[in-house]
Structure formats: structure tokens, C-alpha cells
Image (cartoon, helix red, strand yellow):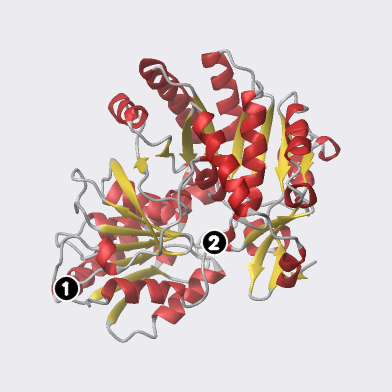
Amino acid sequence: MSISVDVLERYIPIDVSLVDELLAQEIKNNNKKIVVLDDDPTGVQTVHDISVFTGWDADSLREAFTEENNLFYILTNSRGFTEEQTRAAHLEIAEAVDKAAKKSRREYIFISRSDSTLRGHYPLETKLLKECYEHNTGVHLDGEILCPFFKEGGRFTIDDVHYVKYGDELVPAHETEFAKDKTFGYKAANLPDYVEEKTAGEYKAADVISISLEDIHNMDFDKIESQLLSAEGFNKIIVNAIDYADIKVFAVALFRAMNAGKMFMFRTAAAIVKVMGGVTDIPLLTREDMVVNESENGGIIVVGSHTAKTTAQLESLKELSNIEFIELDANLVSDESAFAEEVDRCLVLEEECIKAGKTVCCYTSRSLVVADTGDKEDELRLSVRISDAVQSLVGRLTVTPSFVIAKGGITSSDVGVKALEVKRATVLGQIKPGIPVWQTGSESKFPQTPYVIFPGNIGEATTLREAVEELMNKR
């Protein structure tokens, strides 16, 4: 049942200055490198001046572990993988990370960053990481922290129910379109039941440890730490949160429990990464912050996401008269030859526009193109085929755009890795809340070009238009 956003005002504000001081000391005492495995590139939507590596080769990980920052991201793109591909990638990554850690003589912890609306290969990914971590390090993991809170995206957890903000209402996640995802859908009305549903009863809802908002807002560090110290058997721990201050209180108790010998796996949205990594707040990025190389060429926007929010944002973007819109007919995906011709048609039009100094937006047809075959993995493969076509509309460009925006998780990963050929990027910050911007590396197809990674489920109807206007606004 939906509730009013007014419920967020009923909780007593936390003395953030005190918590910040305590947290800074706990972070200073933590000597473990935080390795964030991100199942699509939107997970950097809360940080800045942090490295993202799109591969896990020895050279990349050696660089990552020698950086001064206490955290880095590895982009797995596993939300676009089959279960078999996800398993193979995580086994490779876990082994490669452990080897790099041992060479650099650093301890580490894994955070499995995934969707704030609870979609993804769960519990497969964290189960694999747990098994590999325990085998490689000899350290036993006592519990798993589940923290899907993500303020920038309007995701709040109250009384173990995870909510998604729509206007003035908070809608339980299981009642949203995200819970109906063909590949990663779920029915559970609260997080303990979600755990039981996703683990097929291996972990019971009644056994889940819940960190309450009341204890957090009372700053009862001792009680929260005691709950964490009680975790055993890889039991699940739910973190209720409505604000970053809540995560900070929890993190103080978490670091204390870890210093006392407890170790945890993490399945979270983007917010807790920022807090555990001690990443500071900075203003939203302006065009001057993002555009290093001025160009007379237009920019390119590719839209692959089919969420209702994305479609509404696309319609708002169409109100701008200085953008050329090209629709890619994704309904042709089952006809290989016809689909290839359609992609070629769009590419020619894009090139003409960008060279003429006009920004172009290429989007997939809004009708649902992936048939319900009853085979989730087959449906995922068809979706990936469409995403491959979308990314090629950037990857096959022969002209350098002034900026690149990709809309949707799988789309933005494919554009970053396959089209732009990024090996390592620096997160500049966010152009809008929850919408990160990479600066591409020297090795990429378009070096030092701002790349905006726009999640399919973030922002208001006007947010995409506002981001585009910022990038096009030459002051």
C-alpha cells in the first residue's frame, strides 16, 4: 500500500556533525580496500573522483590497489548476463582481485552494488563472492548486509518495506513496474520476505536481522553493533534508511563490528558505498566541469531503456526544437537482415546531424519488442541484441560527438565498454542527482569526452531534458 512522502518527516533529525566525526575516525581505522562490483555503470551515481575499471586484468587491478582512494569500482555488467555468464565472470573477478590484493599486501571487502529497485542476479552473485572470498582469504563471512536505500532516486526503506517515490507518494517496490521485470521480477512485499523468496527458502524471513529506523535515529550504536555481532551463518541484515545520516549511523556501528572481528558481504544500492568510502558532497556538474575539448559537433543521446519513466523523459526531451530524433525500429530484431539495415539507416542520419553541429537522439521504438516466450534467459538475450545495436550507433561513429548520453543500465554499459572502449574512467560527479558522468580515458574511442550514464529509473519527467540543456548550453 502506498504512503505519503510526509512520513519521512516524522523521524527525529540526527546530529550529523557528531556522526560525521565518529564515522571519519572509523573510516580512518579501516585498512581494507573496498572493491565494488557494479552490475551496470549507474552504480557510481553517488561518488566523484573515483576510478571505474571495465575489466579485471592484472594491470588494471594492480593500478586499482595502488591508488590512494580506499575504494574503486569494477564494472561487471552482469545485469545483462545470463546466470552462466554471471557465474563465470564473478569467479574470474574474485580470483583476480585476490591475487592483486595479495601482491599489494592489502586486505579487502566486496560490495555487490546492484539496482535500488531490487533487480539483479541475487543471491547468485553474493553467494559466489562469499565462497571465493572465504576460500581465498581464509576469513569467514558472518552475514550479508542488504541496503537498497538510494535517496537521489527516491528509494527509502521503512519498517523493512522498500519504497519507490512517485510524486508525493511512496509505493512499495513490489507494486512497481520494476518488480514485474521479466528476468528479475519478485512478489515479496517486504525485504525479509524478498530474502526468503529469492533464496528459495534457504534463508527464512523470520531469521532476518532488521536494523530499525528508531534505533538509528536514537543513535543507539551499541545496540546496532550488538545486532551485527550476533550475525552468523551468512544471515541477512536489513538496513532501514530514509536519509544519508541513517547510513552514517549504521556505518559507525558496522565498522566497529568489523573491528571486533565480524566480516560481512554487501548487497546494496549506491548510497552506502559513498558513506563507507568517505566520499564528500560536491555541487552538481556544469558544462564547464564536463567538457574539456570544445567542439562544433553535436552530441549524441541513445535511449535503450523501456521503463515508463524513460518514455516520459523522452517525450519531455522532444520539446526541444534543436535536437534531431531518430527512432530505431527494434521490432525488426528477429529479422537479422532487416534489423541490420535499420541500424545502418539510423547511423547515416546520426553522422549527418553531428557533423552539422546538431545534437541527435536515437531511441528504440517504445512498444514492447521482446516476446514473452516463457524462457527468461532467451528473452534477456533478445534484449541484449537490441542493446548491442544501440551501442553500435555510438561505436561505429566516424565523427567525434561533443558529448555522449546513454539511457538505461545495459545500454550505458555497452556504450561505455563496447562503443567507447573505455578501460578506466574517472567519475567526475553527477550532472543531476543520481546521474553520473564519466570522463573517458586516453585509450577510449573519444578521449576526454563527457559520458553521461543515465539510469532508466531515475529522475523526473524533465530530468533528461535538463541534463541535455546543461551540456548544450555554451556560456
Q: Circle 2 sits in a helix, a strand or a loop, which is it?
A: helix
Q: Tell me, for residue 285, which label it has, or none.
A: none
Image position of 364 (left or right of 87): left
Residue 302 location in percent, x, y? 35, 65
Q: Residues within 10 Å of mark 2 (few under 14, many from 20)?
A: some
From the image, tell me which residue sits under label 1.
Answer: 352
Image position of 259 (left or right of 174): left
Image position of 179 (left or right of 421): right
Residue 346 location in percent, x, y? 27, 69
Q: Give, as a three-letter code, the residue at label 1.
A: Glu
Image position of 141 (left or right of 339): right
Q: Residues within 10 Å of mark 1 (few under 14, many from 20)?
A: some
Vertical side of 138 occupied by 32: above or below? below
First in sequence, mark 1 or 2: give its number: 2
Residue extending farthest right: 206
Quadrant holding the C terminus? bottom left
Residue at 49 percent across and 43 percent down: it is 278
From the image, tell me which residue sits under label 2.
Answer: 152
Is 111 in front, or is 16? 16
Residue at 55 percent across and 59 percent down: it is 371
Vertical side of 90 occupied by 14: above or below? below
Residue extending farthest top: 138
Q: Give, as a three-letter code, the residue at label 2.
A: Glu
Vertical side of 141 occupied by 294: above or below? below
